[in-house]
Amino acid sequence: MSFREPAIAGLGITAQGKVYGRTAPQFAAEAVRLAVHDAGLELTDVDGLLMSGGVTDSMGIHLQGDLGLTDLKLLTYMQGYGSTAAQMIQYASMAVQSGMADTIAVVWADDPLKDKTRVSESYAARSVPTGWRGITAANGISSANTMYALAARRHMKKYGTTQDHFGHIAVAQREWAQLNPIAQFYGTPLTLEEYHASRYIAEPFHLYDCCLVSNGGVAVIVTSLDRARALRQPPVRVLGWAQAHPGNAGLRNDDFGLVSGAASAGPRALKMAGVTLDEIDVVEVYDCYTFTALLTLEDYGFVPKGEGGPALSEPGMLGPGGKLKVNTGGGELSAFYMWGMTPVHEGVVQARGQGGDRQVERHDRVLVSGNGGVLDYHSTLILGTDD
């Protein structure tokens, strides 16, 4: 059996944000069709389908029938929360390498937003605590917001990280969003003063420390590099990958808020890709909160552990024109929230050189990360141009 290098050959994204009247499976089906068309393929070329959904959890393997796909060689529904998108691409890549399947659609979609319903209710209605979790809920700790706030407080206490440090991340990503026409905050800049003036969600998090909530879907097509070279778009090579799942879900040990799975998965993914950290040109990290982005960048080694706050706040470090090219589309804080598909989407766009006004000049190696749970699950991808 000959080795087949995997590559991403197609990318599809639906309208994002407050898009009502459509279900997650409908968004998913559209995203797959868009990705197939983007690659210059037909639906009949697809012989593998990996899918996942968000809080609505209305996705399932019945998507095969919705798309009219027959005789699939690979079919499954996955859930690793924010780490799922990159995980699915990893499994699709392994399937291509082994010959298990040739052309695999990977899709994520969700529809938490409902018309005439407050955004804050989209997730709250689905996180009613039961059993022993009711104990923490009785003390106001009942959501991702409050759990991540505790993690951020731990980092602040240990290392002296401040809200100002978080604010610089929020402002920098909003600057990137001003160059991204599909970003939900496109045309709405943010200053550090406006960041501090925004209401608290769960201290120390202000409104702009927290990710958006979006309806929509994103899909990619994974196939062999040789085949991708014959298709419509510039191939994006999948060079390396790794996962890290500490197993602390529901448990909070001495490392809570101080380390993420990036510390373990990052070096292994880089080793597999045969590249070093200083060879990474673009970084697309999971940023459900500003704190998550800061912690992840520390754990990958882009800034020293415990010094992420001051380092990332230095003038000329983040944002367009900055030393670190991080979340170049605006990320989940300012572009759209498709869980792990947000960094995947922008990573593919940058690797292709199709970022328009936000395109990074050097984009040969792109690091993409996914984070799930409350720092419980992690996935890393190293993407590359076809050089």
Image: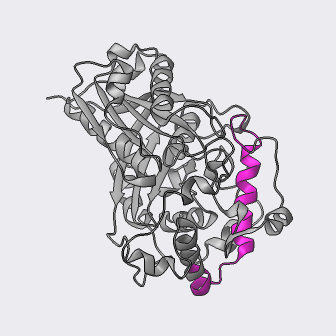
Measuring from the top left, give residue 55's x and y in whole percent: 47, 50
Q: Quadrant of residue 347?
A: top right
Q: Could you tell me residue 64's position as x and y percent?
A: 32, 26
Q: Is residue 304 visible?
A: no
Colour mapping used in the image: one colour
Furthest-left residue in this view:
1
82, 255: nearer the viewer: 82
Number of marks in the image? 0
Query: Residue 288: x and y, percent?
Result: 57, 58
Question: Which of the pair 69/365 is nearer the observer?
Answer: 69
Q: Quadrant of residue 208?
A: bottom right
Task: Name the one closer to the observer, 194 or 232.
Answer: 194
The image shows residue 342, relative to residue 5, as above or below, that is below
At x 44% / y 76%, what residue is drawn?
Answer: 134
Res 261 visible: yes
Q: Residue at x 84, y 59 (%)?
A: 191
Whether residue 270 is in magenta: the answer is no
* Percent position of residue 128, x then y: 47, 65
The magenta span reads 155-184
Position of residue 157 in the picture relative to residue 2 (left or right): right
Give the left or right position of residue 126, taking residue 184 as reference: left
Residue appearing at x 62%, y 36% in the figure: 16
Q: Quadrant of the N terminus?
A: top left
Would you place residue 86 above or below residue 36 in this image?
below
Name the dominant secondary structure of the magenta segment.
helix
53 relative position to 280: left or right = left
